Every structure is written in structure tokens, then in C-alpha cells.
Image (tube, grey):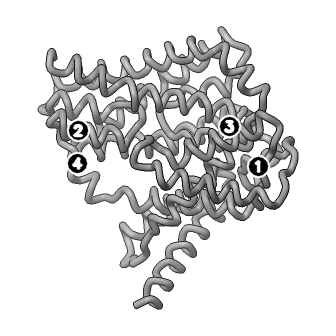
Amino acid sequence: MQLNHIKSFGTTYAVGFAGGLLCLWLHIPIPWILGPLLAIFMCKTFLPFKGESSTALRNFSFTITGIQIGGTFTAATIDLVLPYLLPYSLLTIFLITISLVNAYLLTKWIPIDVPTSLLGSVPGGLSAIIALSGSFKANTALVTIFHTIRLMTVLFVIPLLATQLFTPTSGSENVELLNGLDASQGPLWTIIILVAVYGLALLLQERIPAALVIIPMVIVAIFQITNYPLYHLPDFFYIFAQLTIGIYLGFSVSIKDLRKAGKYCGYYFGLTVILIAISFGLGYLFSLITPIDLVTAILSLAPGGLIEMALTAESVGGDPSIVGSLQMIRMLLIVLVLPFCLKVFLPKI
């Protein structure tokens, strides 16, 4: 039995690795996420594929990616982000409002209840929104599928558009890593701190949304900002983390799920495309009213994918630390503020 599990994991990672290499060869952005995602999805859909993903490895990979993003923070990043916290928050609230209004108007055209449509259109916070769907008497299955459509569309459309619109950095043709090259290497013993951070993230993952990414990102960023750098893990860890996340995403969606949502998928795909277009416009506006460069501003306002947008920023010459920190603010607004607003306004609709 143990041997079968080993073979299954080995096959899964071989398929994911092959997909990553193919995307790398084709110069597709964030190849070690999109490649495994596509490869796993295609194999399990069209072949008698018996692979499986690991929750433990997924959790580990989220933490490694949080460490990776946190390592790109500097004191200058905080100095730059703080003055623009208010305009960014206002633009994000506007983007969320537009998505909810569009979802509400859609219920006038198709036979779907308002709570399901609204919750299925929120630009982020999947786990928290799914948890809320029960209390609002929404269709949890449809909410999950609509969020999956949004996430998959964002993951493929925005990195590809960013690569076409902006000049990639010299390292983007190889491996997209947020490895903090400008930061000082910390002592080897600080690996103990990284292990403790992982343990803390696991401990709090049920209490804090996206704790596996946010906690390591914040803690490592604090060390970086205060000039006490931690040990920088070898690039292999970052590649493996992206590969594992791509595999996890590939297993998270299926043709069966998409068929379950039926013809509604097309409508919510359309809403996502509209949302992406609006986010690009708001990103352009954000770059005009702040000194933040255009690519960083656009990726910071993208409707979802904190990890993927930060990785994309690195590949096209943006600032991944700014993208990561602002995307975290967007997610916190969705997770902490939006549920309260929905509880107040949904009964009145």
C-alpha cells in the first residue's frame, strides 16, 4: 500500500514537472505553477490518471512561498506602501463593489439566487466566502465553482497579458524566483526560526485566513525590514513549492465540476473578464496618483491570486513585495470587512 502511494506521488510530480518544463520552454509566465496545473488537469480529465496531491506538502509549499515573498520586503517597501494605503483601499473597495453590483444585476437575467451570485463573484477570499455561504443560504457548490472560474481565469489571463504588455526581466526566461538577491544572507542557524514560523502557521491556519502564506510572509518581512535577515533557502525549495501549488490547483478543478454549473459558467467567466479589465483601469489610475510603477500597480489590484501576482511581478520587472503587501490588504478587506457588510445588506435586497 505504501509503495502504491509512493508510485502515485512520483507519477503526479513527474507529470507536474514535465508540464513546468514545457511552459518554461514556451516562455509562459510562472511556469512552475501554470505548467503543473495544466498538465494535471489534462491528465486527470482525458487519461486514466491515478495521481494524488498531498495536503501536508501543499501546506508546506504555501509557507515556503510566504517566506519567499516576505524575503523581498525592505524598509523602503513599507515607507512606499504606507502613504498609499488609503487610495489603494478605496480603489479596492470600488472594485469589490463593482463585482457585487454586476453579480446582482446578473440575477435579473438568469435564475440564480442573489446570495449565491454575490458570494460567487467576490474577487478573492475563497475559503472564507465558502464558509459564509452556508449562513447566507447560498449554494455552496456553485459558489465554489464560480470562484474556481474566477481564479483560473485570473491565473492564466493576467500573467499572459502582463508578459505581453511589459518587458520581462532578464531572469524571467529561466525560473521565476522571489529570492531576495539584494538582501543579505542570514546565518544558517536561523533555519530554526523558519521551522518555528511553519509550526505557528499550521497552528493558526484555522483562525487566520490564508495563515500559511500571511504569517510567514509577515514574520520574514519584519526580520528583513529590521535588518536581521534570515537564512535564504536554496532555489530548489521555491521551485518545489510552486510545483506543488500548481499540482494542487490542477486537482482542485474538474470538467465534472464545470458541467455541474452548466451554462452559468459562461456568465461568470464574462464577469471575471470585465473585472480584470476594470482592475487594469484602476491599476493605471493608481499608478497616476502614486509613484508606484504601472506593472506593480496593475498586479496589486488584480482580482485574486496573491502568490501568483507576486511571482508575476518578479517575472515582468514589478516589485513583488509591494504587490504581496497590497494584495494582502485586499484579501483582509474581503475576509474581515465584506462578511459584515453582506450580513447587513443581503437581508435588505
Q: Earlier in the sequence, mark 4 or mark 1?
A: 4
For label 2, the SS is helix
Crowd band around label 4 with a 10 angstrom C-alpha radius: few (<14), some (14–19), many (20+):
some
Instruction: Give the percent coordinates (x, y) of residue 275.
Output: 43, 26
Q: Amino acid at mark 3?
A: Ala
144 and 19: which one is in front?
144
Q: Amino acid at mark 4?
A: Ala
Res. 332 mark = none
Res. 133 mark = 2
To which residue does mark 4 refer?
141
What distance separates the C-alpha of mark 2 from that of mark 3? Answer: 32 Å
Q: Amino acid at mark 2?
A: Ser
Q: Are marks 2 and 3 in contact (CB under 8 Å)?
A: no
Disc 2 versus disc 4: nearer the observer = 2
Crowd band around label 1 with a 10 angstrom C-alpha radius: few (<14), some (14–19), many (20+):
some
To which residue does mark 1 refer?
179
For this orientation, the residue located farthest to the left is 111
The residue positioned 72% from the left and 50% from the top of the image is: 177
For label 1, the SS is loop
What distance separates the C-alpha of mark 1 from that of mark 3? Answer: 13 Å
For label 4, the SS is helix
The residue positioned 19% from the left and 21% from the top of the image is: 346
